[in-house]
Amino acid sequence: MELDAYDRSEIITDIHRIEEILTTDIFECRICRHPLALSAFIELMICLYDLMCKVEKYCRRIDFVDDVINTVKIQKMKVNRYSMLPA
């Protein structure tokens, strides 16, 4: 599927906004109690979620399995997690 102009624009905007937030010192320890730190964190999460949704829409879902050694314990955790979801 090809990116449409609107989604392409949103992706660029999200990336620029993430860069803008991260280049501030809002997450530095010396000002971690700043009243806008939570707002910056929430906006960062919203932008990242939007990017992840677009990756899933145009490519494939991000799953991070390359970074996890697949063991029996991991498989059991995966099964248990999905069995708790509502139908």
Image (cartoon, rainbow, N blue to C red):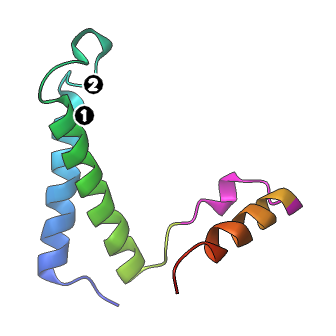
Dividing the picture into quadrants, the one containing residue 36 is: top left
Dot 2 lies on which element?
A: loop
Check disc 2 and report the residue beneath it: 27
> Which is nearer the eye, 82 or 2?
82
Q: Say left or right for 22 vs 56.
A: left
Q: In which quarter of the image is the N terminus?
A: bottom left
Q: Do the residues labelled 1 and 2 touch (CB within 8 Å)?
A: yes
> Overall secondary structure of the magenta stretch?
loop
Which residue is located at x 57 percent, y 65 percent? 63
The image position of residue 19, as x and y in percent, is 22, 41
Please provide the residue range marked out in magenta.
Answer: 63-72
Q: Does the magenta stretch include residue 71?
A: yes
Give the mark nearer the N terminus: 1 vs 2: 1
Q: Is residue 79 above or below residue 30?
A: below
The residue indicated by pointer 1 is 22
Q: Which tag is nearer the camera, tag 1 or tag 2? A: 2
Tag count in the figure? 2
